[in-house]
Image: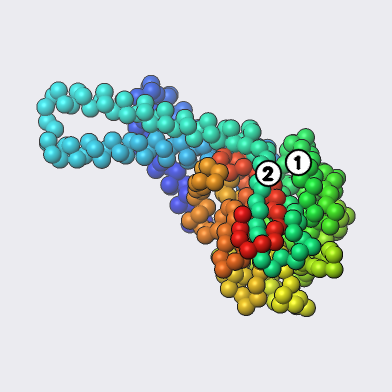
Amino acid sequence: MLRFIFIILFVIALDIYAYQAFRFLVKGRWGTILYFLITVFIIGGMIYQFSTGGRRNMSALTQFFVVSFIILIVCKLVIIATMFGEDIFRLIRGGVNKISTSSEGKAIPSRRKFVSQIALGLAAIPFASILYGVIKGRYNFKVLKYTLTFDDLPAAFDGYKITQISDIHSGSFDNKEKVNYAIDLINEQASDAILFTGDMVNNEAREMDQWQDSFARLRAKDGKYSVLGNHDYGDYVEWPTPQAKIDNLNRLKEIQKEMDFKLLLNEHHFIERGGERLAIVGVENWGEGGFKKAGDLNKAISGLDKEDFRILMSHDPSHWEFEVKDHPDHFHLTLSGHTHGMQFGIEIPGWFKWSPVKWRYKYWAGIYEDAKQYINVNRGFGYLAFPGRVGIWPEITVIELKKGSANA
């Protein structure tokens, strides 16, 4: 409750300060009332939707208020940053010159209006970006390809291709045609195996009802493998009984089986080729910072030989940071997701990437290496809460394994 009150007070403070930019455009009392009524409408709508089950089903109306709230916050932060800079400048200048002449006093409103126009113009940039992210960005699927070289890769697996997808969040989808396009795009990669790293649903197994036939079309000659993500356990909604929650998880496991996914629950599976093998290891969700820690890495690798080549599927990249990379056993490649790249950021492929999520997760998107162990953090196939993506696009990862002494 205290956190909720703080958010409301924060938004009100933003609104009052940002009004400085609008008051040069808003004329009369009714214009001022309308300005503040928009904020009240958006906040009130958010409160109503989430108090009546909006978080559970993320209806179109709930998504509308989520988008509106994000636009409200982001755009007004841009306005405030611009206005605040002008306020600091005016304060410093006032302290130095001790503004008192009538001519300077008349100049202030004119300058203030000019700065307000700049602030509103700058705010139009994130406004347009967010709208694009909602209309186009959430289905702007990208295939990202990597080649990783290992000196101890079994020779029979030289050139082996893996497609990784993660964070489907099927309860958020609303466009069958776009999802089926992405399924076809995955199949076009003709990978040897498809590995799904968790969060098939937002909360409930029934979210897959209208999408099961689509994901059942995925094909790979050595099979499809999956693990559970934090959202798959149904921990973020209230259930009428404890048994209902258990039944929901069991149903989700059945759905994965019906779609020919081999769900790995703290266990491993060997893929054999030419008398050699590699191990696909799958753990349940393990996340730092209050997330479920059902993953049991030692149980999952029980029975493996030290020299086995290992590909680990673990939903949350914090597991790699805090347990996997410093484990006594060697894990050649870990595949994770979870972060979504926050669905918001800036990326220039091969040169620069940034997202606010980097302040929460050290490993948040793409390939990282430590002591000849690699992790790929997939940016996610779907989306959650905010029905869009800005700069961080939905991802299909294709990784080719090569045998050699240096990385390509």
Question: Please, is residue 297 above or below residue 317 in the view?
Answer: below
Q: Position of residue 251 (x, y in %)?
A: 83, 58
Q: Which secondary structure, mark 1? A: helix
Q: Amino acid at mark 2?
A: Val
Residue 261, labelled with which disc?
none
Query: Which residue appears farthest toward the front when viewing the image?
Result: 405
Q: Position of residue 347 (x, y in %)?
A: 53, 43
Q: Nearer the viewer, residue 111 or 247?
A: 111
Q: Which secondary structure, mark 2? A: strand
Per the model, the C-alpha gap separating discs 1 and 2 is 8 Å
- Identify the residue under disc 1: 185
Q: Residue at x 61, y 58 (%)?
A: 407
Q: Is residue 145 visible?
A: yes
Report the number of numbered marks: 2
- Identify the residue under disc 2: 143
Q: Residue at x 51, y 37 (%)?
A: 71
Q: Amino acid at mark 1?
A: Leu
